[in-house]
Structures are given as C-alpha cells and as structure tokens.
Amino acid sequence: MAKIIINGGKTLSGEVKISGAKNAVLPIMSATLLCPGKFTIHNVPDLRDTRTMMQLLEITGAKTSFNNGSVTIDSTGVNNPEAPYELVKTMRASFYVLGPLISRFGKVQVSLPGGCAWGPRPVDYHLKGLEKLGAKLDLEGGNILAEAKELKGADIHFEFPSVGATGNLVMASVRAKGLTRLYNCAKEPEITQLCEFLNSMGADIEGVGTDKLIISGVKELNQADITVIPDRIEAGTFLMAGALNGEIKIKNIIPLHLKKVTDKLIEVGCKVKIEASSILISPPQKINSIDMTTAVYPGFPTDLQAQWVALMSLSESSAIVTDTVYHDRFSHIPELARLGANIKVEKNTAFIRGVNQLVGAPVMSTDIRASAALFIAALAAKGKTEISRIYHIDRGYEKIEKKFLGLGAEIMRES
Ligand code: EPZ
C-alpha cells in the first residue's frame, strides 16, 4: 500500500502552479454525453477522479484520450446509458451522467452512490427534480432506472443549494420542452463554468452565476471546447500550507474565488499579496485563533474545513470550526490528534485548543480533503509522518508531492 513520508519542520518557499479544478471538469466531462461530437477540454488535472470519469464515459460508448493536460472526448458512439456500481462507488461524481444520459436517450441506469468516508451522501434532490421534469424513476438492485418519453420544463426549488443536484438538473433540462426555472441553486464557480460550457454548446441558460437559473429548452446542442478554471480548493490548501510552513506564491488562480479564504487568513495574521492571477502568502509570527463556519459559495468552502482545522491546531489559543454543509465531515480529527492536536468534536462543530507543536506519527487518509489536512499538519510537525491510504489524495490533488518538493518540503512517496 503506497504511502507518503514527510519529514516536517522545514520552511517552505517558492512558487506553485495550481491545476485545473476537479469539481469543474467532472460535470463538464459528463456534459459531453448530451450530444454527439468531438470535444476538447483544456487544463484538465491528471487525477484518479478524472481518469475514473474517462472510464465511465468509455463504458457509455464514448472515446476519450488525455494528452498533456487536455482531454478529448468523442461522444458520437455513446449508446449505453449506464453508470455501473463498481465505478460509482469509487467516485460519487459519476452520478453527474444521469442528467445528460436521460436527456439524450430518454432512459438511464445509474448506480446509487453509497456513502463516503464521513457519512451518507443522499441524492434525493437530484431524483425529485428529475421526477418534476417528467421522469419515471425505479430503484432496482441499487440502481436508479429513470425513463422519460419527453422531459418537460418545470419549476424546481432546491431545499439546499446542492452543487451536484444543480449541475445534474441543469444538464437534464437544457433540452426539455419549454421553460425550467431552478431556484436556490448552487453558485459555486464550478457550476457557473458548467452553465457557460452548456451555453457554448447551444443551450439557453439565463441567470448564470446566480441562485436562480432559467433554462429554455433548445432542440439541439453541439460540440464545444473549453479551458477549465483553476482549482480554488487546491489553491486554498496551498495557502494554508504557506500560513503554517513558509512564504509561498500560488500561481494560475482566480483570486475572487478565494476571497473568503484570503480574508480569513488575513485575520489569522498572514500577509497576503493578491495579484491578477497569483497570491503570495507569508506566515505570521503567531497564528491567531480564528473561528470559522463553512457555507456555500461565496462562503468559506467545506472542502477547506479540514485544512483550516489543521492550521488552527497550531494557533495561539482556541478556535471553533462549524461545518454547516456536511454535519459529520470530521474524520480528519482523530488522525490530527495522533500528531498531537487537541480537538473535541460535538455534532457539527470542532473545538480546537492550539498546541505549541505537532509531532510526526503514522496516520491514515480517510478522504481527499482530510488527507490534505494531514499533509499540511505533517509539514509543520517535528519529525517523520507516514500518511497511508494516499489514493484518497491522488483523487483530488495532481502531483502533490512534486509540488511540495518544489517548495522545499522533505517528502517522498513509498509504493
Ligand atoms: C460537491 O459535492 C463537491 N464534489 C464536494 O467536493 C463538495 O464538498 C460539495 O459539492 C459541497 O460543496 C464535486 O463537485 C464532485 P452537495 P456534492 O450536493 O454535489 C446534501 C471534494 O472534496 N444533499 O452540494 O455531492 C448533502 O448531503 C468533494 O472535492 C442532499 O441532502 O455536494 C450535503 O449535506 C467532497 N440531497 C449538502 O446537500 C441531495 O440530493 C451539499 O451537498 C444532494 C445533496
């Protein structure tokens, strides 16, 4: 089982180029199933999840290839509207094929995604929305079977601004008959880019970037190319690594997507120099303990909650971190405790007492962002940390040890 070994305590310095956004490219890749065509997607991160999505598209009959940062997808031959359990269970985002496949074929079979490391991940908003558009749904052997002679536009109000449900239902409705109005939509930049991509394919989506999307069904869609936006979660992860371990510059980013994060890091005492497509962060003498509550965009992202907890574990006094998006996303806490962090969890809140020092130990990754938190903490810890089950981190961070090596970390992968 591969693991990463980090000798902590080194001061980081230098520059790191941020890769394309995983959570933007996954729905964009699914959207190519909507119509036959040859699509090229640029600035794609080479991750387990992007490779898994390519596998999934091939199962439906598409042809895919990945060459230095660009993925081409030929969806002409797509003829099998299906997403099997063995893929869906490894990557929940496989569920994104539901909308495009039912739009193109009028039927689709997608395995229900199970839970994930930190708890249940329901898809009821996706399914209720599809039924509103006229789909008939059955659950058989863990698979959702959805059929619709014709999808008809409808008004859909999301109970919660779900990223996945917004993406899936926008894709399901772009060719539905008539008008679909989605209320309380996710406004994450990744969903905004998906809508822009769909409009470049000929869809008619208004209100892009807001929480109300008005989709007028069109007759046909065509091939389009796109360059994926930078990954704001990878960027935020490196900013927090810098806040703890040394002055670093992150490049190829969109600072606006990180506004809430940089505001909080300034409260921590960091010096943050923001330029057009880069941010230079310098660590403070002492890390102020700053409370944080996650929220949907443009709030502080839940995908940076674990990394923030790692940062606060070495802060001056005590900090409270609440996750309002996922109430049970704290599997990183016991592992941080193994490094000496002093944290108590009650319901969806972590109570962190800053300690003077973390000490290296063997720890285990449990999900993509928990792993990132362990990296950040291990880089600051005294001595050696071994991080196992690193397939989690490879799902969402491209060449992570190479990037940290480039910043002066003492890090290696042992297979
Ligand atoms: C996306 O997941 C991201 N994944 C997640 O990032 C991210 O944590 C999440 O959005 C929140 O920002 C991708 O984009 C591939 P949601 P998604 O639907 O779409 C509840 C990472 O590390 N909910 O916005 O699955 C749900 O349980 C990953 O890159 C329902 O109850 O998230 C959660 O509490 C992890 N019913 C909340 O809504 C539904 O039908 C937000 O979930 C759907 C969601």
Image (cartoon, rainbow, N blue to C red):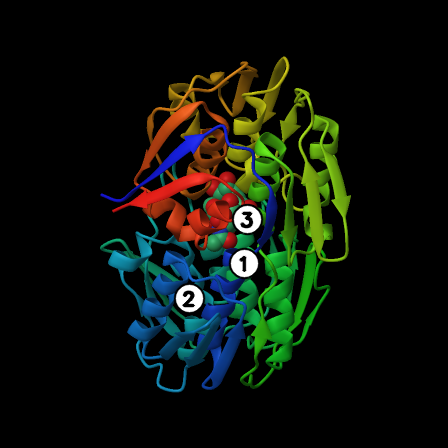
Residue at 42% across / 77% down in the picture? 149
Contact, mark 1 vs mark 3 (Cβ under 8 Å): yes
Please tell me whether residue 376 is drawn above or below residue 42 in the rendered image: above
Say few, some or many: other residues with alpha carbon within 10 Å of mark 3 (under 14 / 14 to 19 / 20 or more).
Answer: many
Q: Does the numbered disc 1 mark a residue whose Cβ is under 8 Å from ligand 1? A: no
Q: Which of the pair 51/69 is nearer the observer?
A: 69
**Is residue 395 something that shows in the picture?**
yes
- Which quarter of the picture shows residue 110? bottom left
Give the amino acid at mark 3.
Answer: Glu
In this rendering, the label closer to the viewer, 2 or 3:
3
- Find disc 1 in the rendering and name its residue: 19
Q: Position of residue 30 (x, y in %)?
A: 45, 69
- Find disc 2 in the rendering and name its residue: 97
- Find disc 3 in the rendering and name its residue: 234
Give the amino acid at mark 1.
Answer: Ser
Residue at 65% across / 38% down in the picture? 247
Q: Position of residue 18 (x, y in %)?
A: 57, 55
